[in-house]
Image (tube, rainbow, N blue to C red):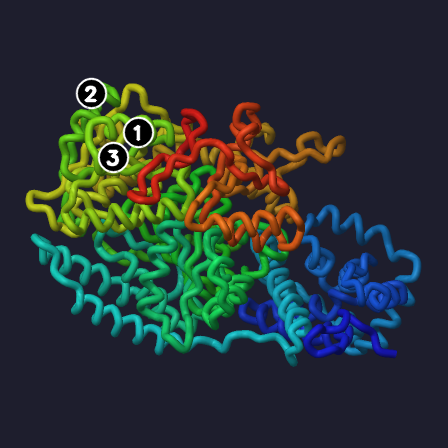
Amino acid sequence: MTLWAHSVSDVSGVRHSLQAHCRSTGEWASRFATVFGAGDLAYALGLFHDAGKASCSWQSRLLEVEASGARVGVPHKELGARLLHPVADVAAMAAWGHHGGLLSKELFEDFVSEGPVLGETDTAAGYFDAVPEAKTVLDGPGLIPSGWQGEGNELVMEMGLRMVFSALVDADHLDTGAHRRGLLGPQVADPADMAVLADRFESRRLERITRKPNLAGASTSTDLLRAEVYGAAVAAAERDPGVFRLAAPTGLGKTFAQGAFGLQHARAWGKSRVVIAVPFVTITEQNADVYRGLLDTEEQPVVLEHHSSVRFEPDRDVPAPLTEAQRWGRLAAENWDASFVVTTTVQLFQSLFGRKPSQVRKLHRLANAVLILDEVQALPTRLLLPILSGLRTLTEHFGTTVLLTSATQPQFQSLSVWRGPERGGGELNIDEIITEPQALFDRARRVRYQRRLDAQVSWEQVADEVSDQPQALVIVNSVSDARQLYRLISERRHHVWHLSTRLCPEHRRAVLAVVAQRVRDALPVLVVSTQLIEAGVDLSFPVVWRALAPADSIQQAAGRANRNGEYAGGGLVVVFDPAEGKRPTDYEAGCDLTSIHFGSTGRELDNQDALARYYEELYEQLRLDHRPIDRTKWNVGHVVQDNRRKLDYIAVTDGPEIDLGRSTGRDRKKAFRMIDNDTVPVVVDDADHRPLIDATLADLASGRVGSAKALRTLQPWIVQLSSFRAQQPETAALIDNIVGDLGRWKGTYDWDPEDCRGVGVVDDDLPTVF
């Protein structure tokens, strides 16, 4: 008797046999996991994951719902997990969670202890008749790799289960998708020839440098320094895999240098891909465009850009079939089946510490990869312990090389997870690409600082002085501050623009494009922005004003002044303390230490020794490594690490139970969340794209399109409001609910498409960061 795994394909007109699906999933999962030494375990998980579909009830129900396309609705994940438990132990949890996600060791052991349910013995017999080789697996040795087991390896086991779960769900989705599309089997990209990509990158980079016109007044020393940084990165790529650090001033071509390092290191050491993660979408888009120009061809896209704002479908108001590049991008984004990936740190780490198949599916691609974290100073401080621990485990056990790049390198090695040996391992070595970074910073200094911290100033005073500047950038610490100062300057002169997350992504891009063009053309331009502009955005002003902030933010802001050495006499950075200014509470410690170490009589902000001491004292003041005896007082980093060691994946992503054993409520403040504040997405109006927005919202409300696809389409016109603010009656009245928590903004949206000016969503003066 033939057993079925999936109903008839609309393309091929045939059903998918259970035997074929289990074998193919096992083989592909094994192929993915062999890279990190878990091929046998992944094969067994793939072979057994759908064993429960051999039940008579599941087979009958599949045929009943085939015509309607309804869900079968008969549980099938339990049998394979139970059968595998004797040889896979807790790793069988991966089969148990291949639809809903990883749960916890405790829940899994409770499930196993319950024993088989009625009819399971007959179902198992039917499965073994269909897939007889499965018996051999159960008669064999234990499947968990030896390096994952034993005291001191709890975090290796935790990461190993994530990685093998990723291999399983990716193989399962690929095989199922191939059946749906009438293909003979999963479609996976051939391994990239990293030598070809590295050579193409280098030749196109040289062409770009040759074609680039000299900027008026540009210093030739800047080009020499860029060449020095690039050469150091390429030379370092030959060194042994591990953790690397690139400390270099802004404007010295880190985008080129880190890309070259990734490709050359992949070529030298047989790495499978390069993954670059950056903190903000604006930088992701900017960098992805650069890398596409260096690597893509008309025949073959190479660079996968994957983040919340990417749309892989054409606009509905400009109907057209998917291009090959769009089709490739949409498929590759699901599992990062690409040789060069540009993503965000939010996407990366929410996946690395997630538990749902859609999040985790791509993780196995990090094994034997080069992972580059750009602007690493922007990683959330409260989560540094699990992030650094996870990176260390990837490098020491899964063949990942990690490169950290920043002009303000944090002192990560002062934290316990990197400072000394992890249990079962040695000291973590950090390989410096620039061996003497201070000398480089001294030679590359292109700005001078005015630190006006002895007395506070009013916004009126700032507006008066800034308004006299032909070109200037002012960076403040909250949306309300940016909005207030923008309006004050607008009363004094024209040619002023606003940037914050109260503008939707599409309009922020438009502002950046207008501003960049005016800067290049030496036209009058003033910009008032939150700190979203200060990392990686390729703009250069003669004068930058920065409201008092942590030292790394001030130095990043300085990277927008005289970026290319084009202003005679250098750039000017004015650091000021606004009397009416607002700033997030987690800035307080950093601002105090900045005043101490880099105040009016302090060291230069790019002094590497002073910056290292600043970070060490900051981590000490924030008590990141402090773990009280009372567990209820542990910070989020320690709580996440503790739950990782317990293999409690639910507690990692959703937080621990608030009232253990008495309630299902969880403390989300103790969960791993890259974005700590709960927000509500609202769609704003855009006259140029109103037909697309209206149609997509109508389709979403009626159920004609799924929420994930709709959100990808709408992302360019979405603004995130804090949940607290959105729930206030006066704000809630301005939001038309569409579905779930997605709404349409009916209130004021200040935006002039003619000159790209305005402050976006106008609610009230909340101290919102960015």
**What amino acid is at disc 3?**
Val
- Counting from the top left corner in percent of width and height, residue 7 is at 77, 70
Q: Nearer the viewer, mark 1 or mark 3?
A: 3
Q: Is residue 745 placed above or below 509 in the rendered structure?
A: above
Q: Residue 654: which numbered mark, if any?
A: none
Q: Which residue is mark 2?
A: 454
Location of the C terminus (image quadrant): top left
Return the residue nearer the eye: 681 or 603. Answer: 681
Q: Nearer the viewer, mark 2 or mark 1?
A: 2
**In the shown orientation, is residue 496 left or right of residue 10?**
left
Q: Residue 593: which numbered mark, if any?
A: 1
If you read the primary sequence from the N terminus, does the residue marked by circle 2 or circle 1 appear first? Answer: 2
Return the residue nearer the eye: 324 or 494. Answer: 494
Q: Which residue is mark 3?
A: 474
**What amino acid is at disc 1?**
Leu
Which residue sits at x=10%, y=56%?
221
Q: CA distance from mark 3 to mark 2?
A: 19 Å
Report whether residue 613 is seen. no
